[in-house]
Amino acid sequence: MLMLAVLVSFETFAHGVDDSTRNFLENNTGVQILPFVYIGAKHMVTGYDHLLFLVGVLFFLRSTRDVLLYVSMFTIGHSLTLMTGVLANIQVNAYLIDAIIGLSVVYKGFDNLGGFKHFFGKQPDPKKTVLIFGLFHGFGLATKIQEFALPSEGLATNLLSFNIGVEIGQFLALIFILLAINFWRQFESFNRFAKATNTALMSAGFMLVGMQLTGFIVS
Amino acid sequence: METSQVNQTNRSLVKATISSLVVAVIALVLFILPAEYSIDPTGVGQKLGLTVFNEAGSTPTSASSDGEQDAVLLTVPAGKGIEYKLSMNKFQKATYEWVTDGGALYVDLHGEPKGDTTGYFESYTIASVEEMKGSFTVPFDGSHGWYWKNNSDKDINIQLLFSGNYVIEGLK
């Protein structure tokens, strides 16, 4: 029984959408706004790859205005691909998309370390890159949603609800990440560990890439 | 506005990048790949028990057990059926208990006589249930066990516990 519990909870962790959610998604009928909002929010709060990317994006942002601007770029990006991906039924391999999301984490860590400016003379426009990676993150979400055979009745409304949930979840996650980073920023250790943190971020990104590419190969 | 960055020298940037890659590769090989895909070239994952997640469907090759309980995790793919068998001699007994992680399965607990080529089998229990508990004493030498059929559209996992006098044949 314990082994089974471990197995089930691991599945939950690995896919971001657990069995009971999956069951609900596949068996629901018609428009169900709040459940979809909830799933979207849950997906975002428990999606470690998205959270890592957000940590990278927020790391050096100080003003509220910048935070809003960058987060909006990311949101526009992933909302676009999430909606069009599902509605136009575009299938992308989930492993490859997740590998790209891992790469986005590596990218942001490297960018925060000043890698692009240092090696290539200039940093790519960070707002544009956040938008582009937002597009990929949205495709990731779209692909995951498409793994479930969703009933077409009320699909658009349900998807919109899911998307709203994603935003709520992202907002919740952002608040905690921002609070933590801003709190840490007051201390001298923030600067001292900035390099280590972003190196760790890159490393986590590489792990995601390796894990997803392996999944792509063996699946 | 431009985001601030850590100021770096060539050397420390390269060092940071390479060390992040090295740590990632080590973590992948030692822990992540064994846990996620049972790819365990070093054997460390096995030692730490990380490969347990993917052992569903794998077969313990161990032989007969005396009072010891065997446990196995099985996955019945959506729309498919699997068989798990024990080799037992006439009048030997096995006690068992199994439960799914959600959803009922069609089950046929049955035995096939040793050396039989006609396809004959004898069913001891037929049901559609989420869990079952019991024992059986076999009427002839042969291969005895469960056939599960998953009629739903999602995979169902089974935890099967059993003990008694048998040699495990495993998945068929």
Image: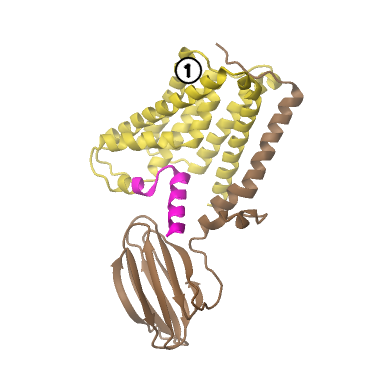
Q: Residue at x 28, y 48 (%)?
A: A27
Of residues A6 and A199, the one drawn nearer to the viewer in this rendering: A6
Q: Is any atom of residue B138 visible in this view?
A: yes
Task: Characterize the magenta stretch by its predominant secondary structure.
Answer: helix
Of residues A218 and B27, the one drawn nearer to the viewer in this rendering: B27
Q: Colour of chain B?
A: brown
The colour scheme of the drawn protein is by chain
Which span of residues is magenta-colored? A1-22
Chain under callout 1: A
Q: Position of residue B102 (x, y in %)?
A: 34, 57
Picture quarter with the N terminus of chain B:
top right
Q: Residue furthest top?
A: B1
Q: Residue at x 42, y 25 (%)?
A: A75
Q: Residue at x 44, y 72 (%)?
A: B162
Q: Is any atom of residue A88 visible in this view?
A: no
Q: Residue furthest right?
A: B11
Residue A11 falls within the magenta-colored stretch: yes
Q: Which residue is mark 1?
A: A67
Q: Which chain is yellow?
A: A
* Residue type pointed to by label 1: Val
Q: Position of residue A30 (x, y in %)?
A: 23, 41
Secondary structure of residue under mark 1: helix
Residue A51 in the figure: left or right of residue A38: right
Residues packed near mark 1 inside 10 Å, few (<14), some (14 to 19) or many (20 plus): some
Q: Is residue B13 above or below residue A144?
A: above
Residue A116 falls within the magenta-colored stretch: no
